[in-house]
Amino acid sequence: MSQKTCAACDCELDQNSIKVKLGGKTVEVCCEECAAAIGEAEAARTSAVSAGR
């Protein structure tokens, strides 16, 4: 059986994982803090892309 880990911190995921959109894909994170971190990273990425970086 494969083990799933958080997309932000690599912690093991359980049944309470949170799904977050990242770059058009859905990833799973372990908690609200990691969900916020992923959201901030995605916002920074899209901002940089739209600025032509």
Image: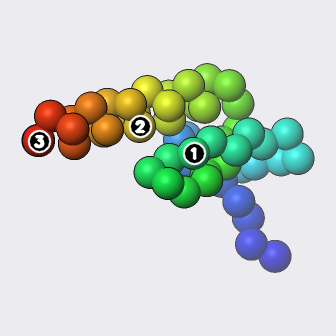
Q: Split into 4 quadrants, where in the image is the C terminus?
A: top left
Give above or below for 17 relative to 25. above
Q: Give the foreground label among 1 and 3.
A: 3
Q: How is the image coloured?
A: rainbow
Which residue is label 1 attached to? 21
User: Is 42 left, or right, of 51 in this rendering?
Assistant: right
The residue under the point 22% across, 42% down is 49
> Foreground: 9 or 52?
52
Q: Amino acid at mark 2?
A: Glu
Q: Earlier in the sequence, mark 3 or mark 2?
A: 2
Q: Give the residue furthest to the left.
A: 53
User: Is 25 left, or right, of 19 in this rendering?
Assistant: left
Crowd around label 3: few <14 · some 14–19 · many ≥20 (10 Å): few
| Image quadrant where residue 25 sits | bottom right
> Foreground: 42 or 14?
42
Q: Earlier in the sequence, mark 1 or mark 3?
A: 1
Q: Are marks 3 and 2 in contact (CB under 8 Å)?
A: no
